[in-house]
Amino acid sequence: MPRIDRYILSQFLTLFGFFALVLVSVYWINRAVSLFEQLISDGQTALVVLEFTALTLPLVISVVLPIAAFAASAYGTNRLASESELVAMQAAGMSPWRLARPVLVFGVIVAVMVAILVHSIVPMARARMADRQAEIAQNVTAQFLRAGSFQYPAKGVTLYIRDIARDGRLEDFFLEDARDPNNQATYTATEALVVKTDAGPRLVLLHGMAQNLRLSGGQQQLSITRFDELAYDIAALAEAESQRNRDLRAYSTARLLRPDAELLAITGSTADKALAEAHERLSKPLQAPVAAMLGFAMLLLGGFSRFGVWRQVVWAVVALIFVQFLDTAASNQVAQNAARWPLMYVPSLVGGLICAFVLWRAARPRGPKLRATKGDAQ
């Protein structure tokens, strides 16, 4: 690589590191705050909160890197222009196409980073998060056994505990199970204990009453049973909570490209949705070189102005917003119909065409120069 290319590339990479650090910090803190509130309200410790926020970091980085590449290329090009380095390069005979070569290399480097994240690290982090959520769901006391408030661990299930003793006893326990509208059960007990077994957690109710309301043939039948001890299986509630956290994003791209029956059964998804998720990952790295080239090419338009290049910066931001709008629209279309996954590549294609047109426009001789050339010829 020529020295001038290495110089431009080093400038952009340095700025990229700075903008990536700032943007990742802002995005990550924003996501971490909401996650912190959710986990703390569920009774989790600070270590669990720290682990979960760390597992969200790869996804945040993969989202931020293309934006950081755009900011680095736009700011770097602006600095090269303000320090007359860009003018010197153009006066030496370097065309916009030639100047764009190190910028394209910079974009490809960022694209490789994004590809490693979305195809390897992010699925691993999501899989680990799903496993940890399943483990936490097995810890019923931390998940939804909290004193003094009504809890809804599953749809149709209401739970209330007046107080939790230091030895783990649940005092004044109330549980309503209305998942089956034709057979609703209500359990009350003076005390209850959570017992862990090989088959999952069990609730042992002490000195209480069970009421069953059955609907049969349009008639209601209420039966009441008093008991000294009663075991209630709550493993199904924890299992339902963990299964909701399993999605396609926790699996590798290779498996999503060839979804098998086991994968579709675990995720409850379809083959088209699996392919859509895989192609979304394949298309995401393409956004990085497009963003970098947009930040560079737009600033080459127009001549010298003592007011700076703020107009070109505005056009660069507008172009990036337009490409992002196309990406959001394509994602919405694919979400409605997963068979439309080829639309995921359209935003990057349109962005590439915009970059090519802008570079072609910047390489054309400007009007005054053309008129002066014609006048000399006459």
Image (spheres, rainbow, N blue to C red):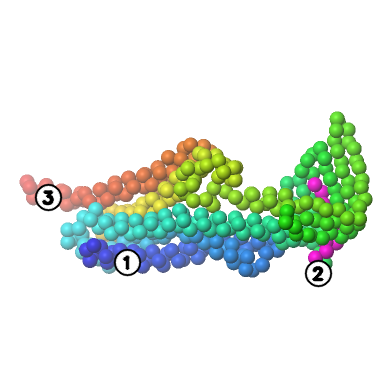
The amino acid on which the numbered mark 1 sits, given as a three-letter code, is Gln
Q: Classify residue 215 as left or right of residue 352.
A: right
Residue drawn at the location 28% of the way across and 64% of the way down? 8
The crowd level at tag 1 (other Cα within 10 Å; few <14, some 14-19, many 20+) is some
Q: Are marks 3 and 1 in contact (CB under 8 Å)?
A: no
* Residue situated in front as seen by the camera: 213 or 61: 213
Relative image position of residue 259 (x, y in whole percent): 51, 42
Indicate the position of residue 373 as horizontal and vertical percent values: 12, 50
Report, in whole angstroms, how far the alpha carbon at label 3 lies from the one at label 1: 36 Å
Q: Mark yes or no: residue 132 visible.
A: yes
Look at label 2 and name its amino acid.
Answer: Arg
Three-letter amino acid code at the position of disc 3: Thr
Residue at (78%, 59%) from the top-left corner? Answer: 195
Label 3 belongs to which residue? 373
Cβ–Cβ under 8 Å for marks 1 and 2: no
- Earlier along the polypeptide chain: callout 1 or callout 2? 1
Q: Is residue 310 visible?
A: no
On the image, which quarter does residue 42 sit in? Answer: bottom right
Quick check: is 168 in the magenta stretch? yes
Callout 1: SS = helix
Quadrant occupied by the N terminus: bottom left
